[in-house]
Amino acid sequence: MASKILIIGACGQIGTELTMALREEVGNRNVIASDIREGSKELMASGPFEVADATNFDQIQDLVMHYEIDEIYLMAAMLSATAEKFPMKGWALNMNSLFHVLNLAKDKKVSKVFWPSSIAVFGPTTPKHDTPQNTIMEPTTVYGISKQAGERWCEYYFKKFGVDVRSIRYPGLISYKTLPGGGTTDYAVEIYHEALKNKKYTSFLKEDTELPMMFMDDAIRAAMSLMEAPADSVKVRSSYNLAALNFTPETLSKSIRKHIPEFEIDYAPDFRQAIADSWPSSIDDSSARKDWGWKPEFDLEKMTREMLKGVKDFHEV
Ligand code: SER
């Protein structure tokens, strides 16, 4: 019998595409999407959906029992820029939702958990280039602190209670199906929308701010292959470094200009610049490659082609 999967935060930037990919893989009825609000038409029409609040243990437990869930993907979170504005709310959402899921796994109500961490776990004292799997981690954002604490709890629940929790430190994620919200890396999505609509974009990060990034298809494939890996090959139970591309707003604008020659970019850095400056510019993901065979498929040129096509359709629908 196919595993029954619950996705919490199914209507967000990652959740939307993850839900559709998992439904494709294990069948629509076996993937229960949940969020505090309804999502895209495609998602709502494709299988079961339940309104649930990730911070409400009883609501999550009821779903797990009702649908006899085996695996949970916890995708609900408040991202870096928004969490700087609402620190206590961000901390409460990011931590309480994780505890609820880890406790359900500890009590054997579910057998496997996926939870995304982020490059935000690193900080200004971390080596900036080829940031190693194990290194100094002194995050300076509320979001980063919550993800780092979350990683420690994941490893703790694995070691202490045998909870099969698996995690990836995602870089900035680029996609066209659902707009991201509240992240520092979101400029790299907005830029495509503005390039197509107005042929110009004002970046809130400086031209030479290099950050690790990834196209959504790679991010989804990574989560699914980590979850499919045999348990004993998953050596890292905090969270895996994961890399695909690194670029600056300037390099990204050049790749767009190859398709839209009149595209113009200017720069007006805001509070998100300091967040970006505290993060690595490239990541060493050799542990993920070695342990479960990770390899990205999208480079900058391929991603730009897909994004321009996808964003165009997004605005035409
Ligand atoms: N993309 C996220 C953010 O910018 C980082 O995980 O907040």
Image (tube, rainbow, N blue to C red):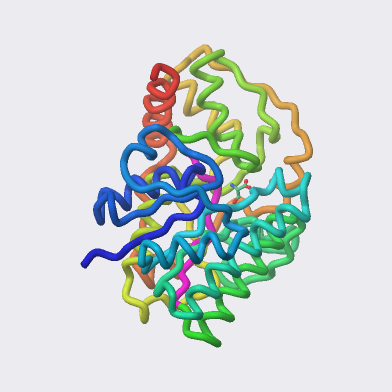
Position in image of residue 21 (x %, y %)? 32, 48
Residue 98: quadrant of the picture: bottom right
Position in image of residue 295 (x %, y %)? 36, 57
- Front residue (pair 80, 251): 80
- Front residue (pair 290, 98): 98
144 in relation to 133, above or below: above
Q: Main secondary structure of the magenta part?
A: strand
Q: Is residue 245 visible?
A: no
Q: Describe residue 273's horizontal placement relative to residue 154 as left or right.
A: right
Region rendered in magenta: 164-174
Q: Is residue 40 visible?
A: yes
Q: Describe residue 132's horizontal placement relative to residue 141 as left or right.
A: left
- Front residue (pair 195, 70): 70
Position in image of residue 25 (x %, y %)? 25, 53
Spot the residue most to the bottom: 160
Number of marks in the image?
0
Q: Please state, as top left, top right, bottom left or bottom right, where the C terminus lies in the image.
A: top left
Q: Residue at x 71, y 62 (%)?
A: 145
Position in image of residue 64 (x %, y %)? 43, 65
Q: Residue at x 43, y 25 (%)?
A: 311
294 in relation to 297, above or below: below
- Front residue (pair 134, 232): 232
Q: Is residue 215 magenta?
A: no
Q: Residue at x 64, y 64 (%)?
A: 96
Residue 119: quadrant of the picture: bottom right
